[in-house]
Image (cartoon, grey):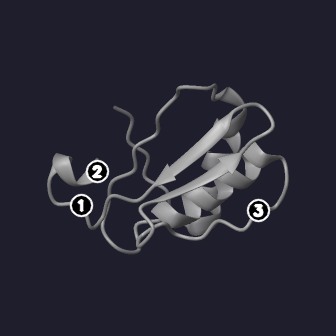
Amino acid sequence: MLHFDLTSLDATAALAQKLAPLLKAGDVIALHGGLGAGKTTFSRALISALMCAETEVPSPTYTILQTYVGPAFPIFHFDLYRIETPDEVF
């Protein structure tokens, strides 16, 4: 597990943009943190970088899943905030 202490939303977005070119199909990034921790900022920057264009990235808090057809591989953006047990995912 890696841990990063990022001091701003800009630093969070910059980390996501630097990580994007290193990812490949099948990779998983799990973000954990309270409200305001920067999970959405990271996700938006990462997905936009993977899509090679500024992309509208709504939070999937209520839909649970947003999918994107990336140029290199599909992207699945889950938000499991409301999930209380593993069975609820299925």
In the visual, does 70 lie left or right of 66? Answer: right
At horizontal 72% and vertical 32% (from top left) the residue drawn is: 21
Within 10 Å of disc 3 (Cα), the crowding (few <14, some 14-19, many 20+) is some
**Residue 89 numbered tag:** 2
Tell me if residue 60 comes above or below residue 31 in the rendering: below
Element under disc 3: loop
Residue 14 seen anywhere in this rendered image of the structure: no
User: Residue flagged by tag 1: what amino acid is it?
Assistant: Ile
| Residue that lies at the very extreme toward the front in this rendered image | 90
Q: How many marks?
A: 3
Q: To which residue does mark 1 refer? A: 83
Q: Which sits earlier in the primary sequence, circle 3 or circle 2?
A: 3
Q: CA distance from mark 3 to mark 1?
A: 26 Å
Front disc: 3 or 1: 1
The residue that appears at 40% across and 66% down in the rendered structure is 37
Front disc: 2 or 1: 2
Check whether the beta carbons of the residues at disc 2 and disc 1 lie within 8 A of each other. yes
Q: Amino acid at mark 3?
A: Thr
Q: Considering only order in the chain, which callout, 1 or 3, is on the residue closer to the N terminus?
A: 3
Kindly identify the residue that appears in the image at 74 percent across and 42 percent down.
70
- Residue 19 location, x and y as percent? 63, 37
Which residue is tagged 3?
55
Number of residues whose C-alpha sits closer than 10 Å to that of mark 1, classed few (under 14), some (14–19) or many (20 or more) = few
Report which quarter residue 12 is drawn in. bottom right
Left or right of 66: which side holds 13?
right
Q: CA distance from mark 3 to mark 2?
A: 26 Å
Q: Secondary structure at mark 2?
A: helix
Judging from the image, what secondary structure is the residue with disc 1 in? loop
